[in-house]
């Protein structure tokens, strides 16, 4: 037999355990003790279970509120920018193009092949300018979003072409789907030459802080004729863009500045680095618009998908 004192228990608990109304100490056998402990444990466990359920409902409510806020923010982000649309409308009017206000969003006339063709017709120069002005992106390698950027000189040239100034050159050529690689295009040769029509000088630039697409990637196209922001002498003389990237020299901001390239730091930041390529334009079987490098790396014009919150924490 065990002699126990339960001064800390309520009268109800003691009576349930077999005590009398006087709450006098009572000798209990082992089964009585186990019974008391079991009932106490059951009471505590029931309370904990209720707390856990409350916590679960609270977490569910928090997630619902979180996704509700994200949905509202997404709705506001998807609203077309009136100033940008007004600017593109005015530019289209100058070039003899039509852009109806019924278009659902900027993404439609930049990325949807049917709307793109209806909007720009054969004016590829104007299309490239609008891609640049709207900070449009190209999807390389299934998710590497590169923002398209034209140097000032190339944009000026394309603007004149878009307006019909014959002295500034011809419209850029967009090759058919059968020309999936640059070496398949007519009169191709391994060289650094570019004509701003069939072939373009360009760079892939990485680690750009504010690049559209959220990955820090920019694809720059430059004018091949005396462009202060274009290829430097080393990039021209040492060009071998038909080879693999691993065997070529990547340049940093300081390297370009030492070679006399202007505005590189202002445009892309202090930590940017990159590699020069020749590029050409082509469609695919679905009429998607592709910008392709000589080494075969290429991307199609595509709207950047918004990266998830937790994805952004880890890459």
Image: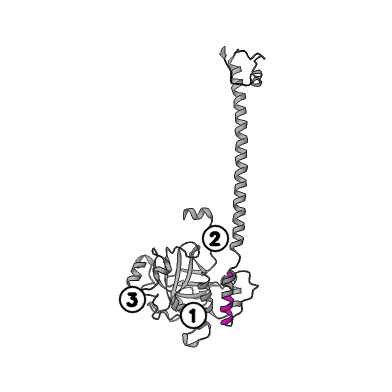
Q: Residue at x 62, y 61 (%)?
A: 75
Q: Secondary structure at mark 3?
A: helix
Figure quadrant of the N terminus:
top right
As drawn, is 174 to the left or to the right of 18? Answer: left
Q: Secondary structure at mark 2?
A: loop
Question: CB of mark 1 within 8 Å of CB of mark 3?
Answer: no
Distance of label 1 from label 3 (alpha carbons) = 24 Å
Number of the label disc, if any, that sits on residue 233? 3
Q: Disc 3, disc 2: CB below 8 Å?
A: no
For disc 2, the neighbor class at 10 Å (few under 14, some 14 to 19, many from 20) is few
Of the two numbered discs 3 and 2 on the same chain, state the one appearing first in sequence: 3
Q: Secondary structure at mark 1?
A: helix
Figure check: 308 above or below 149: above
Instruction: Tell me, yes or no, whether the two marked residues, 2 and 1, touch with CB atoms within 8 Å.
Output: no
- Mark pair 2, 1: CA separation: 30 Å
Residue underneath mark 1: 158
Q: Is residue 96 magenta?
A: yes
Q: Nearer the viewer, residue 46 or 189?
A: 46
* Residue 220 image offset from top left, x and y in percent: 44, 71
Q: Tell which circle, 1 or 3, labels the residue nearer the N-terminal end.
A: 1
Q: Which residue is the site of mark 2?
A: 306
Write the start and end of the magenta stretch as one range.
88-106
Q: Closer to the N terminus: mark 2 or mark 1?
A: 1
Can residue 277 be spotted in the picture?
Answer: yes
Q: Residue at x 54, y 60 (%)?
A: 306
Q: Residue at x 59, y 60 (%)?
A: 74
Identify the image quadrant of residue 47.
top right
Q: Label 1: how many residues lie within 10 Å, few (<14), some (14-19) or many (20+)?
A: many
- Measure how far apart labels 3 and 2 are at the Cα level: 39 Å
Q: Position of residue 21 (x, y in %)?
A: 67, 15
């Amino acid at each position: 037999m065990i002699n126990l004192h339960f001064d800390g228990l309520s009268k109800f608990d003691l009576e349930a355990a077999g005590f009398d109304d006087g709450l006098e100490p009572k000798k209990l056998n082992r089964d009585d003790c186990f019974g008391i402990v079991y009932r106490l444990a059951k009471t505590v466990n029931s309370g904990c279970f209720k707390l856990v359920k409350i916590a679960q409902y609270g977490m569910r409510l928090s997630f619902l509120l979180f996704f509700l806020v994200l949905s509202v923010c997404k709705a506001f982000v998807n609203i077309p920018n009136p100033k940008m649309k007004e600017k593109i409308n005015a530019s289209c009017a100058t070039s003899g193009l039509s852009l109806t206000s019924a278009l659902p969003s900027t993404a439609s006339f930049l990325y949807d092949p049917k709307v793109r063709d209806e909007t720009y017709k054969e004016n590829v120069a104007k299309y490239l300018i609008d891609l640049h002005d709207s900070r449009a992106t190209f999807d390389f390698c299934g998710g590497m979003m590169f923002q398209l950027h034209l140097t000032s000189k190339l944009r000026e040239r394309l603007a004149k072409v878009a307006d019909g100034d014959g002295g500034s050159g011809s419209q850029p050529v967009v090759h058919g789907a059968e020309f999936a690689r640059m070496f398949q295009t007519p009169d191709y040769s391994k060289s650094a030459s570019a004509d701003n029509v069939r072939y373009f000088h360009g760079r892939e630039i990485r680690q750009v802080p504010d690049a559209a697409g959220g990955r820090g990637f920019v694809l720059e196209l430059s004018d091949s004729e005396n462009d202060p922001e274009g290829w430097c002498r080393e990039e021209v003389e040492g060009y071998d863009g038909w080879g693999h990237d691993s065997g070529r020299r990547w340049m940093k901001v300081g390297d370009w500045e030492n070679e006399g390239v202007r505005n590189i730091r202002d445009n892309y930041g202090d930590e940017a680095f990159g590699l020069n390529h020749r590029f050409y334009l082509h469609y695919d079987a679905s009429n998607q618009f592709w910008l392709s490098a000589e080494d075969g790396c290429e991307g199609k014009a595509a709207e950047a998908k918004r990266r998830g919150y937790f994805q952004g924490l880890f890459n």
